[in-house]
Image (spheres, helix red, strand yellow):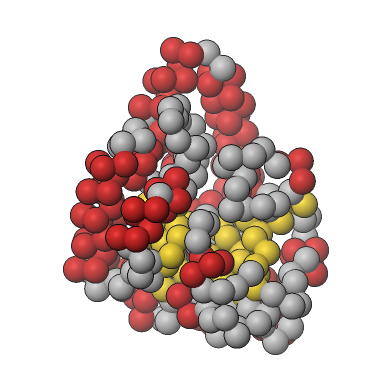
Amino acid sequence: MIFVYKKWEEICRKLKEKGLKSIPACEVKADSGNYVVLKHDVETDVQRAHRIAQIEKQYGHRGSYYVQAYLLNNKKNVELLSGIQQMGHEVSYHYDVLDSCRGNMAEADREFEKNLNLFRNSGFPIITVCQHGNPIIERNGYSSNRDFFRNSSIKEKYNDIADIMVNFKESFSTDYLYFSDAGRTFKLIYDPINNDIINSDDKNIPFNSVDELLNGLDNEIGNIISIHPHRWVKSATFYLCKKCIFKVLKTVAKIMAKIPVFNRIMGKYYYLAKKI
C-alpha cells in the first residue's frame, strides 16, 4: 500500500460508508462497543499531521495525535497543533522519557512531568498518552518506554492518565484490535501491549489494500488504527523514493546493531530514527 494522502482519504471515506466515525482515545468509554480510534504518532512533521487531520475532519472523523514534546518549542507547530485540536481531535504527549534518560526512572519522571506541564500550559489537556518505540537504541535494565507506565509508582502518581499501549484497556474498561503502519505496511499487531517483551512479529497479519485493512476490523470491540503522519506524502513517486531510502537505512542499521561499538553509538543518536 502506498502511503499518500489520497489513500488516507479513501480509508476515511470507506470508514464513513461503513457507518464508523472515529473518536479520540480520551472519549472511549466502557460502553463504547464497536469503535474506531485513528491514532497518530507525531514525531517530526506537524504540517503533515495537520493535513491528515483536515482529511479526517472532512469525513467527520476525530482522532488522537500523540506529539513529541520537543515539537512544542516551535511556535508554528503549536499553532498547527491548536488547529488540530480545534477540529475536534485529541492532541497529547508521545513520550520517550526512559530512552531519553537511559532507563533512569527518577530522571524520566522529572522529564515527563516537565513535558506534561509544557503540553498543559500550551492548551493541551492530557488524558491519554502513548510511548515512542525507538527502533534503534541500546537498552539496559528495561524493555522499552512502556516500562515507565508499567511502574506502580508512576501509575499512582499519574493516575488520571492512561498509556494507550500499557494500561488503556484496564483504565477505560475496553478491549481493542491494534493496526499499525509501522514498517510502512499496515499490519494487525499481535499482543501490542507486550510485543516489546516477547517477539511476536511472525504472528502479525499484513494487509495489502484498504479493503483488506477495513475488513479486518472487529465488529464487536474497539479498533485502533495507528499511523505516522511524517511517512504520508502527496506524491506516490516521492513516497516510493523515501521507502527505498528507508529500506537501505534499516538494513544498514540492523547490520551495525550487531556490532557492539556501533550499537552504542546508534543508541546515543536514536532520535535520528524519527526522521526515517
Q: Position of residue 37 (x, y in %)?
A: 57, 72
At horizontal 25% and vertical 41% (from top left) the residue drawn is 107
- Across the whole image, how many numbered discs are drawn on residues? 0
The answer to whether one can see residue 132 in this image is no
Residue 191 vs residue 265: left or right? right
At horizontal 74% and vertical 48% (from top left) the residue drawn is 204
Q: Position of residue 57 (x, y in %)?
A: 51, 80
At horizontal 42% and vertical 82% (from top left) the residue drawn is 88
From what the image shows, is residue 206 above or below residue 117? above
From what the image shows, is residue 110 above or below residue 276? below
Q: Position of residue 49 (x, y in %)?
A: 45, 63
Q: Is residue 133 or residue 198 the one in the foreground?
A: 198
At horizontal 48% and vertical 14% (from top left) the residue drawn is 260
Q: Is residue 29 or residue 65 the one in the foreground?
A: 29
Q: Position of residue 112 (x, y in %)?
A: 28, 52
Give the quarter of the image for residue 145. top left
Give the quarter of the image for residue 66. bottom left
Q: Is residue 238 or residue 97 the one in the foreground?
A: 97
Q: Is residue 172 or residue 19 the one in the foreground?
A: 172
From what the image shows, is residue 156 above or below residue 241? below
Residue 223 vs residue 87: left or right? right
From what the image shows, is residue 168 above or below residue 221? above
The answer to whether one can see residue 161 in this image is yes
| On-image quarter of the N terminus | bottom right
